[in-house]
Image: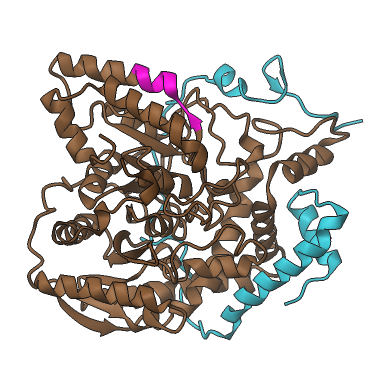
Amino acid sequence: MALERSDVEKIAHLARLQIREDEIPGYTGTLSNILALVDQLQAVDTDGVEPMSHPLDAVQRLRADDVTEPDQRENLQSVAPAVENGLFLVPKVIE
Amino acid sequence: MFDKTLAELAGGLAAGDFSSVELTRSYLDRIKAEDPAYNSYITVTEEQALAQARAADELRAAGQAQVFTGLPVAHKDIFCTQGVRTSCASRILDNFIAPYDATLIRKFNDAGAVMLGKTNMDEFAMGSSNESSFYGPSRNPWDVERVPGGSSGGSAAAVAARLAPAATGTDTGGSIRQPAALCGITGLKPTYGRVSRYGMIAFASSLDQAGPMARSAEDCALMLGVMAGFDPLDSTSVEREVPDYSLTLNDSLEGLRIGLPKEYFSADLNPAIAEQVQHAVREFEKLGASVKEISLPNTGLAVPAYYIIAPAEASSNLSRFDGVRYGYRCEDPKDLEDLYKRSRGEGFGDEVKRRIMVGTYALSAGYYDAYYRKAQQVRRLIQQDFICALADVDVIMGPTTPQPAFRLGEKTSDPVQMYMEDIYTLALNLAGLPGMSIPCGQSNGLPVGLQIIGDYFSEAKLLNVAHRFQQATDWHKQAPASVKG
């Protein structure tokens, strides 16, 4: 199906992606082409076919409910853009 | 030295012909001199490599060497390497120094391997040409005006250019097999779940799988032996014993049943490739195999099903790149939403954004059943095709790609045209089956790949089949003219 400019703006917002004004026509065209490609599936008869989410139809393995992870906060936060007192810093969320 | 396979280098180290430090040093020197032409590495880890090589030589001196001790390899820049930048070829991870090792990296370290560096790739493994890399495209050593394929294009180019004896790759829709074919090397995509994905940056979780890329099946067997195995840190990792892949390489192919899917030899296929593949199949007949035509009737649905499932899972996986916990953050965000949108908008490249948007659309309210669920149903039809076919034959053979390496820029303007490049490789990932690509000929001086597909967990059989072919032929020994000497 062909997308409109407003569809692309809405999708970009849902995906939390900033798309520049001048890029929107390009994305509208290429995304429409991709959707036309995948729309071929609509013609396939899949009545009664069980959806396949895992190649081996495996079930989720569970582990024992034991404490196994050491505290790695400093190590993991060493790559964060901004931290303070062990917390990730973001712009003010609550006025 | 650079024309030696991993197996030969292992022999040389064991015999004391050279040390791991000498071997590593010579590869590092060669990378420095030659890689500007190919851009196959994003990061060369010289200091770490030499430290690992020294440690390997000490182990050997102490009589504690294993098969892999001191052998240099390169890793796709999708695997987290503690203390070393792990970029996934994206601006959004350009500053990311991984705080831990992927299980695969740990296994190579434990085996005594030396990491030469991190190889170039399509951004987040999304692409078939390496042109979506933030660090610029890698180039095909057979013709630097052509692409090495993707997404593991840097790994393939590095091995083909003799800038690493072997490398790791990942394959979500053909990303090991297609570049292996285009660069004239041997690559194996294992069964889904065979190799741990822990610390391998996720693209499409129900499809992703890591595997070896090397100059021969024998070397891939050595590599897979290090990589494969159960890992409690990856919930999709399979608890199943790892065979010694080297032990069965020489088994006879007498009575091997080969199936050729008629859908893989349609009008889309370049006639020169069809001819080389048929020629290879006749070689297998000489080795005692029987050949019959088979049908995989839903082959044509693999591309559309894949381009719903992979982007849907990618849009979910890539939501973690938010500019808060690691990676790129935009300048002066005015509020949290601005921080998310600009960090992601500025951090991701075009193709990644396109796939995130396709996936977001397919999963958005009201569309889930029509797209994702429908694609998962078609996925089962594709799997059933393979299961039916593999009841009658031991392996399936066909082309890896519809044409040899194409020119840089040739397909970048039309993503759909680029997607068709993976027409013969995607179905395997949807089914979760293992597959290989081995060099089987040339067309106008460019390598042609033969794809070999087997049943679940038949990696040992695939390696055996490929190895026997490589004992009888020398396509895998051909080197690009530019890298001889």
Q: Quadrant of residue B464?
A: bottom left
Give the residues in magenta: B43-51
Residue positioned 43% across, 55% down in the render = B179
Pinpoint residue B475: horizontal percent, then vertical percent.
25, 59
Give the main secondary structure, helix, strand or loop, of the magenta stretch.
helix
Nearer the observer, B124 or B387? B124
Question: Does B242 sit above or below residue B370?
Answer: above
**Residue B259 percent location from the top left of the image:** 25, 77
Quadrant into which the N terminus of chain A falls: bottom right
Does residue B84 appear left or right of residue B401 in this picture? Answer: right
Q: Is residue B290 magenta?
A: no
Look at the picture and state if B330 lies above or below B129.
above
Look at 53% across and 33% down and name the residue there: B86
The answer to whether any part of residue B317 appears in the image is: yes
Asked if residue B124 lies left or right of residue B169, the reply is right
Instruction: Answer with left or right where residue B86 lies relative to residue B361.
Output: left
Q: Which chain is cyan?
A: A
Chain B visual colour: brown
Quadrant of the snapshot with the C terminus of chain A: top right
Residue at position x 27%, y 45% from top? B224
Does residue B2 appear left or right of residue B474 in this picture? right
Q: Position of residue B151 (x, y in %)?
A: 50, 52
